[in-house]
Image (cartoon, rainbow, N blue to C red):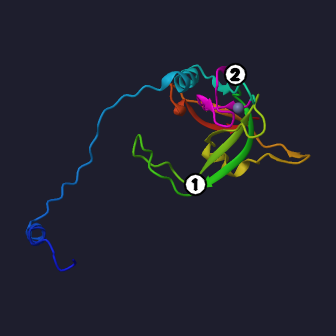
Amino acid sequence: MEKEMNVTDNDNFDTMADQELIVLRKTISVDQKFATGPVMGKFLTALKDKRILAIQCPECGRLQSPPREMCAICRVRNREWVEIGPRGEMRMMEYCYYSSPDPLTGESRETPYGAIGILLDGCQKEEVFWHLLRPEHLEMVEMGIVMGDRVTRGTRLRPVWAQERSGSIDDIKYFEIDE
Ligand SMILES: [Zn+2]
């Protein structure tokens, strides 16, 4: 069977190899709009008014912010809205030395920067909100830790709002030490 090679296909392959390949290097930009939907849209709209909203699961009661339509643990639709924060306590920080380009702008953030998980007032346990820490405060913050009965309070933080807000997660510039 192996000896019955298709001669015609082989000829085509050779012809293609002789052709000059042309490479076009272009960055294309396509303007586009997409709907944020009723759940994420409500969250983003509230940011314009300097309010942070969470959505609550009707079964387990956990809060999610940014909100999800469903509670993935209970597999039920979330319906109740709760305003949280805007102040809170730092619980986790990822100290980032490498920055990937922002898919929306193509720009990379200055490094190092701190991606932080903040337990906003009104939230508990793992209900942290992820955002950025003010770069100048990178070395000045403490993480809060809960291990069994041992609770260490993290640094209190407050959001710094952008002067002009458009209903985007960037309406919060970053969180800074609240003192
Ligand atoms: Zn749930």
Ligand 1 quarter of the rendering = top right
* Place of residue 179 in the rendered image (x, y in percent of width and height, measured from the top left): 76, 35
* Place of residue 88 in the rendered image (x, y in percent of width and height, measured from the top left): 74, 34
Q: Secondary structure at mark 1?
A: loop
**What residue is shown with label 2?**
82
- 124 and 17: which is toward the camera: 17
Among the two numbered marks 2 and 1 on one chain, the one whose residue lies closer to the N terminus: 2
Task: Give neighbour class at mark 1: few <14, some 14-19, many 20+ (Cα, 10 Å).
Answer: some
Task: Please identify the quarter of the rendering in which residue 31 is found.
Answer: top left
- For the point 78% across and 39% down, the residue is 125
**Quadrant (top left, top right, bottom left, bottom right) of the N terminus:** bottom left
Q: Secondary structure at mark 2?
A: strand
**What residue is shown with label 1?**
112
* Place of residue 101 in the rendered image (x, y in percent of width and height, measured from the top left): 44, 49
Is residue 97 at least partly visible in the picture? Answer: yes
- For the point 74% across and 44% down, the residue is 91
Q: Which residues are magenta?
A: 62-80
Q: Amino acid at mark 1?
A: Pro
- For the point 55% across and 24% down, the residue is 39
Question: In the displayed image of the protein, which residue is found farthest to the right?
Answer: 149
Q: Amino acid at mark 2?
A: Val
Q: Is residue 7 left or right of residue 28?
A: left
